[in-house]
Amino acid sequence: QVQFVESGGGLVQPGGSLKLSCTGPENIFKRFDMGWYRQVPGSERDFLASIAWHGTTTFIRESVRDRFNISRDNAKNTVYLQMDSLKSEDTAIYYCNNYPATTDYWGQGTQVTVSS
């Protein structure tokens, strides 16, 4: 089954930083726009950020625009989400996928917990 694999989550104190990574097979990554999403249990999965396949165009959701940044390395089939000044409300499971998302490619996500 083809899926993306997220990593880099963990427990961090408020105000801290994390950098998430996501890799996938070249055939679903290299020529595709990519996105980061997050989900709190009991809620829908929300879009956070996207990056064009060539890496020069990005979009960050307004609510996190001053704290999050998306980037990618096509040579490594990897997309990143740099998260700074983390808040308790950022606690969620974080996923990557194509943008727009492809239903079959959701991975397990990586848990981010922001707590003191």
Image: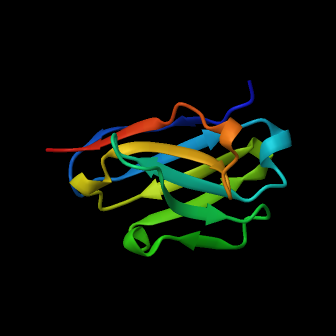
Q: Residue furthest left?
A: 116
Q: How is the image coloured?
A: rainbow
- Horizontal and vertical percent position of residue 40: 35, 45
Residue under the point 24% across and 58% down: 15
Q: Position of residue 110 (x, y in %)?
A: 46, 36
The residue shown at (36%, 60%) is 84
Q: Residue furthest top?
A: 1
Q: As displayed, is residue 110 above or below residue 80?
A: above
Judge by depth and name the residue closer to the eye, 3 or 78. Answer: 3
**Image coords of residue 18 (percent x, y):** 40, 48
Residue positioned 68% across, 45% down in the render: 78
* 29 displayed left or right of 62: right
What residue lies at 57% left-to-right and 51% top-to-bottom?
80
Going by the image, does 111 lie left or right of 12?
Answer: right
Q: Which quadrant of the rendered structure holds the C terminus?
A: top left
Relative to 66, is 107 above or below? Answer: above
In-front residue for pair 22/44: 44
Q: Is 88 on the left-hand or right-hand side of 80?
A: left
Task: Indicate left or right for 93 with 51 as reference.
Answer: left
For the N terminus, the image quarter is top right
Instruction: Where is residue 37? Give x, y as percent.
Output: 51, 52
Q: How many marks?
A: 0
Does 10 appear above or below 69?
Answer: above
- Nearest the viewer among 45 and 49 is 45
Q: Looking at the picture, tell me which residue is in the foreground, 114 or 42.
A: 42
